Amino acid sequence: MVDELLPVSITDCPTPKVMRRRMYIGGVISKHRLSFNLQTPGYDGCIRDFKVNNVVQSLEGESSRDIIPCARPTKGMYAHEGGFAVFDGLHKSIKDGSRNVDISLSFRPIVDEGTVLALLTNSNPESARLSIEVKQDKVLVTVIHEASGLEIRDAIPVLRPLCDGQWHSIHLLVGEKVMEIKIDEERNELPIDHMSPDARELLLNLPLNIAGVSGKF
């Protein structure tokens, strides 16, 4: 059966005795290829949702040969050549009345420089923003709110290279007096006790950009 189409005719089908003994998916062993004079090569490609008698069967096992499990589905994304994602301000996701900025994510860069996340104004990003960027083996943190005179710029060295083909994690927490940035297992703190309520409120309302920013900024 192909999709929902019923077969029109079936020829050269193995006898029930053969079907009871062994079933091959994707190809057959060389011994049986010679015995049955099979000229068609084995199948190259992906196979999923394999069922026998409507029961899902695993294609991985001791009798499998030269197969590679497909990537497990995730809720991740791949930012390709300037790609990015934009979300509404954080104030829409706060349910307990907290005024903290709390963002965490895992990332695996293929280049050693780029924006991981940014909170930016639509009209004038230079006047108010919070950004975290990676540059070689450092994480650059910038927080600016010109109206209140707030300006924080810091470069945090990392314990191991970020562009090493492995997954890394970042957790940003802007509390009442301290901004905490955790990179993998390394925790860093920056004092922000002079951040005004207006600056904090603005950060909570700015669009959140992940993996880059729109060209209109």
Image: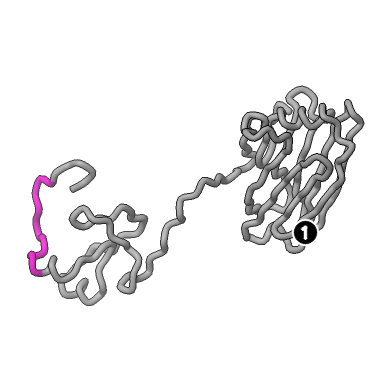
Percent from the top left, x then y, of residue 149? 92, 31
Q: In the shown orientation, is residue 184 left or right of residue 146?
A: left
In front here: 6 or 33? Answer: 6
Q: Residue at x 71, y 28 (%)?
A: 205
In front here: 74 or 188? Answer: 188
Q: Residue at x 88, y 26 (%)?
A: 147
Q: Quadrant of residue 51?
A: bottom left
Outermost residue toward the bottom in this view: 31
The number of callouts visible is 1
Name the magenta segment's main secondary structure: loop
Whether residue 61 is situated above or below residue 153 in the rendered picture: below
Q: Which residue is mark 1?
A: 158
Q: Residue at x 30, y 60 (%)?
A: 43
Q: Residue at x 8, y 69 (%)?
A: 17
Whether residue 118 is situated above or below residue 63 in the rendered picture: above
Q: For the magenta stretch, what is the residue range?
A: 7-17
**Which element type, helix, strand or loop, lies under badge 1?**
loop
The amino acid at mark 1 is: Val
Q: Quadrant of residue 188?
A: bottom right
Callout 1 crowding tier (Cα within 10 Å): few <14, some 14–19, many ≥20: some
Outermost residue toward the right in this view: 149
Percent from the top left, x then y, of residue 167? 62, 57
In front here: 171 or 217? Answer: 171
Q: Quadrant of residue 165?
A: bottom right
Quarter of the image where the C terminus is located: top right
Q: In the shown orientation, is residue 1 left or right of residue 163?
A: left
Percent from the top left, x then y, of residue 37? 17, 70
